[in-house]
């Protein structure tokens, strides 16, 4: 290892230790009480960090279900610290092989948590489709029967299976019972998902409170979700067909390999026999 590479490695090590120390300090402050959190945000403002970034990242984490998958204690500072920690760890580990490998590994690991959050949110949206369709049907039936929209929304969580959606509906029901403000409760519920069907549901319910024309819109969106489910099932079928084809090719290649090995063995045996 050259002198420059040793210096770079030492610099990365000191940077890693510094980020680790600052990250742990910021993470502890973020997990403290509300007063501690305000101090963190105030110090961030003093240091020139944008509070708009903090709030934007916080809303992004909530909408994509990071708090559900990684725990409620995850926040913008903790998430940023996790990304930096992974990036520097990859840089230090693979830097010993080659500097280019270290930079590549550090970059990939730095963006890995964000990609993982988006991937899990996409999986959640697919899992929620049957429950959302059931919610639309249930609201449509209860609205036709004359049930008030607030009462119908407060009872939806009992018929939902997907855990993330069920938890959000349970919190929505609690907000409706404690505060009786449908607009604010729906706004908080909508911010917990990055799902266009959830957005449409909240908009329709708010429009229904103003105009009363919700039954037809709920029916139309229920049909859209049915088409979306058919598209998802078609994609799963195509993926399954590709997997079957891949396995068949693997078995064929393995059989051909065994046959070729047997043929070559027999040829060498015949050659040595002469």
Image (cartoon, rainbow, N blue to C red):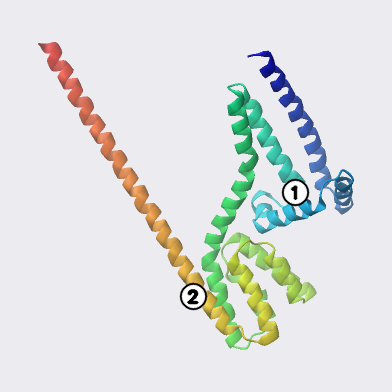
Q: Under tag 2, what secondary structure?
A: helix
Q: Quadrant of the N terminus?
A: top right
Q: Is residue 141 visible?
A: no
Question: In the rendered image of this protein, does residue 19 appear above or below residue 150?
Answer: above
Q: Is residue 166 visible?
A: yes
Q: Under tag 1, what secondary structure?
A: helix
Residue 175 appears in which quarter of the rendering?
bottom right
Residue 63 appears in which quarter of the rendering?
bottom right
Residue 36 pos. (x, y %): 88, 49
Q: Nearer the viewer, residue 256 or 153?
A: 256
Give the class, few, some or many, for how many residues have Cα within 10 Å of label 1's Cα (few <14, many ≥20). Answer: some
Q: Quadrant of the C terminus?
A: top left
Question: In the rendered image of this protein, does residue 174 appear above or below residue 239?
Answer: below
Which residue is located at x 58 percent, y 71 percent?
A: 159
Among numbered discs 2 and 1, the one appearing first in the sequence: 1
Which residue is located at x 16 percent, y 16 percent?
A: 269
The numbered dot on residue 76 is: 1
Which residue is located at x 70 percent, y 84 percent?
A: 210
Which residue is located at x 74 percent, y 29 percent?
A: 16
Residue farthest along the front direction in this orientation: 4
Give the class, few, some or many, for how many residues have Cα within 10 Å of label 2's Cα (few <14, many ≥20). Answer: some
What residue does disc 2 label?
Answer: 223
Residue 223 pos. (x, y %): 49, 75
Residue 103 pos. (x, y %): 62, 30
Q: Is residue 121 left or right of residue 251?
A: right
């Amino acid at each position: 290892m050259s002198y420059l590479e040793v210096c770079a490695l030492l610099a990365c090590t000191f940077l890693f230790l510094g980020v680790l120390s600052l990250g742990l300090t910021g993470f502890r402050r973020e997990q403290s009480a509300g007063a501690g959190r305000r101090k963190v945000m105030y110090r961030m403002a003093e240091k020139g960090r944008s509070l708009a970034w903090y709030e934007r990242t916080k809303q992004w984490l909530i909408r994509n279900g990071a708090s559900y998958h990684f725990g409620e204690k995850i926040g913008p500072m903790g998430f940023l610290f996790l990304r930096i920690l992974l990036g520097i760890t990859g840089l230090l580990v693979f830097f010993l092989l080659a500097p280019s490998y270290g930079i590549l590994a550090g970059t990939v690991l730095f963006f890995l948590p964000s990609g993982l959050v988006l991937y899990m949110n996409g999986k959640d949206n697919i899992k929620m489709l049957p429950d959302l369709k059931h919610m639309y049907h249930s609201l449509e039936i209860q609205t036709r029967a004359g049930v008030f929209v607030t009462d119908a929304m407060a009872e939806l969580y009992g018929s939902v299976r997907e855990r993330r959606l069920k938890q959000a509906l349970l919190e929505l029901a609690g907000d409706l019972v404690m505060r009786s403000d449908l607009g604010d409760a729906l706004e908080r519920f909508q911010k917990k998902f990055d799902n266009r069907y959830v957005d449409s549901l909240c908009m329709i319910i708010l429009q229904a409170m103003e105009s009363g024309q919700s039954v037809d819109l709920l029916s139309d969106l229920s049909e859209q979700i049915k088409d979306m489910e058919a598209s998802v099932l078609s994609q799963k079928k195509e993926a399954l067909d590709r997997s079957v084809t891949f396995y068949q090719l693997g078995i064929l290649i393995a059989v051909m390999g065994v046959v070729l090995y047997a043929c070559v063995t027999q040829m060498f045996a015949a050659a040595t026999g002469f």
